Image (spheres, rainbow, N blue to C red):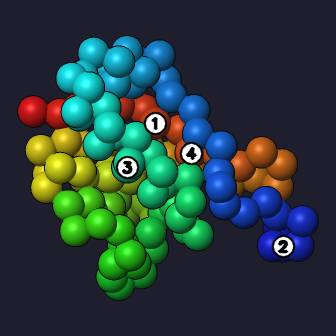
């Protein structure tokens, strides 16, 4: 696949039912942090944040890490609120309608 004709940011985002229910159950101030993390993901040039210091443009309280380092195109975890919360997501890169899928969300 070439980048010609490939859609770029902002990406579509979908939530699993479990992740959406977990987000909706969070306190309002935490939902605002989740919304800020969501905004960072859907506008990122590369939602996989590959490379050294690829997440340097994220706010100081957010970091992105691979869930399994042996799967470079696998799931990622976006840590927010200085690591007190996280979202596990995958990026489905396809020519039409590429999207970020949030599979799990947690905050403590």
Residue 10, by quadrant, is bottom right
Residue 78 percent across, percent down from the top left: 32, 52
Q: Nearer the viewer, mark 4 or mark 3?
A: 3
Secondary structure category for the residue under label 2: loop
CA distance separating discs 4 and 2 = 20 Å
Whether the residues at callouts 2 and 1 have beta carbons within 8 Å, the answer is: no
Disc with the residue nearer the chain's start (4 vs 3):
3
C-alpha separation, residue under disc 3 versus residue under disc 2: 28 Å
Distance between the alpha carbons at the discs numbered 1 and 3: 11 Å
For discs 4 and 2, the disc positioned in front in the rendered view? 4
Q: Which residue is mark 4?
A: 100
Badge 3 crowding class, 10 Å Cα cut-off, few under 14, some 14 to 19, many 20 or more, is: many
Q: Which mark sits nearer the N-terminus, 2 or 1?
A: 2
Judge whether residue 92 can be spotted in this image: no
In the image, residue 22 above or below residue 64: above
Q: Are marks 1 and 4 in contact (CB under 8 Å)?
A: yes
Q: Going 49% across and 23% down the picture, which residue do you hit?
A: 16
Residue linked to disc 2: 2
Using the image as rendered, state which of residue 96 and residue 10 is in the foreground. 10
First in sequence: mark 4 vs mark 2: 2
Where is the N terminus found, in terms of image quarters? bottom right
Element on which disc 1 rests: strand
> Distance of mark 1 from mark 4, alpha carbons?
7 Å
How many residues crowd mark 4 within 10 Å: few (<14), some (14–19), many (20+)?
Answer: many
Residue occupied by mark 3: 37
Q: Which mark is residue 84?
A: none
């Amino acid at each position: 696949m070439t980048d010609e004709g490939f859609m770029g940011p902002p990406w579509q985002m979908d939530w699993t039912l479990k992740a959406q229910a977990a987000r909706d159950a969070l306190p309002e101030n935490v939902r605002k942090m989740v919304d800020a993390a969501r905004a960072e993901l859907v506008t990122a040039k590369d939602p996989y944040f590959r490379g050294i210091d690829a997440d340097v443009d994220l706010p100081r309280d957010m970091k992105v890490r691979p869930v399994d380092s042996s799967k470079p195109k696998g799931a990622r975890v976006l840590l927010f609120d200085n690591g007190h919360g996280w979202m596990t997501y995958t990026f489905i890169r396809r020519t039409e309608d590429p999207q970020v899928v949030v599979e799990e969300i947690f905050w403590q």
